[in-house]
Amino acid sequence: MEISKTLKPPYYAVIFTSELNNSSEDYEFVSNRMVELVQQQPGFLGFESAREGIGITVSYWKDEASILKWSSNFEHQEAQKLGREKFYKSYSIRICKVERAYCSEGS
Amino acid sequence: MEISKTLKPPYYAVIFTSELNNSSEDYEFVSNRMVELVQQQPGFLGFESAREGIGITVSYWKDEASILKWSSNFEHQEAQKLGREKFYKSYSIRICKVERAYCSEGS
């Protein structure tokens, strides 16, 4: 996992924060499939993810229309249903407009 | 660490993504002090943080003015300098307007 290189603002970010249930046997499989699928979506710019107690996944998008289209993707909707009913103890989704951004040069 | 309960949108989010350098002896001390300090700032609504390879910290704010004030806080500026020069191999800061948000009920 690397820090995403994105566009110059403005663009969009979806901040997805979650707490997993203890028993989530299919979680890894579904999660990996979503990572594969999201990268094929028009307008997808990149994502960053880390789990340490809570999980935070931020995906970056060209515009809101791309986010709406991804959220209504059939396979993604099936995954969302599993998430709500099985994988997540709790979660939060925030749709944001990235207005300004600063990056280090890296080294 | 819990998922932050925030306001109804709109409010602001700062997405801070980072890769630590290998040797960051004072990092934990400075990081803990910033967690303590940020919670005393006017307009601060909460934060979420996880590190797994990369670190993602999202802080939530009432408005942009609160973010600007925090970024110019003296002790925070000293910490930012240490971050740039010592702690972080690379980092990215994104200032976002949270336009929509959805939460699970939790369980």
Image (tube, coloured by chain):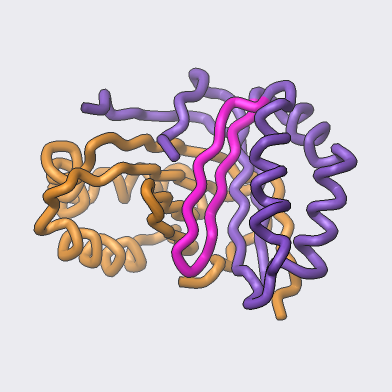
Chain colours: A orange, B purple
Q: Residue at x 26, y 27 (%)?
A: B106
> Outermost residue toward the bottom?
A107
Q: Position of residue A13 (x, y in %)?
A: 50, 47
Q: Is A85 part of what is drawn in magenta? A: no
Residue at the spot 42% in from the left edge and 58% down from the top edge:
A50
- Looking at the picture, tell me which residue is in the foreground, A11 or B105: B105
Question: Residue A104's quadrant in the figure?
Answer: bottom right
| Quadrant housing residue A59 | bottom left
Comparing B37 with A47, the one in front is B37
Q: What is the x, y in percent for residue A54?
A: 38, 46
The answer to whether residue B53 is left or right of residue A36 is: right
Which SS type dominates the magenta stretch? strand
Drawn side of residue A54 relative to residue A62, left or right: left
Location of residue A26 (image quadrant)? bottom left
Q: Is residue A15 above or below residue A51?
A: above
Quadrant placement of the C terminus of chain A: bottom right
Q: In this view, does B89 lie to the left or right of B45?
A: right
Q: Position of residue A70 (x, y in %)?
A: 31, 50
Q: Which residue lies furthest to the right in this view?
A: B74
Which residue is at 76% across, 61% downward?
A: B83
- In this picture, which residue range is highlighted in magenta? B44-61
Q: In the picture, which quadrant includes the N terminus of chain A?
A: bottom left
Residue lying at 80% horizontally and 52% vertically, measured from the top left: B79
Number of numbered discs visible in the structure rendering: 0
Query: Against A90, is B88 above or below?
Result: below
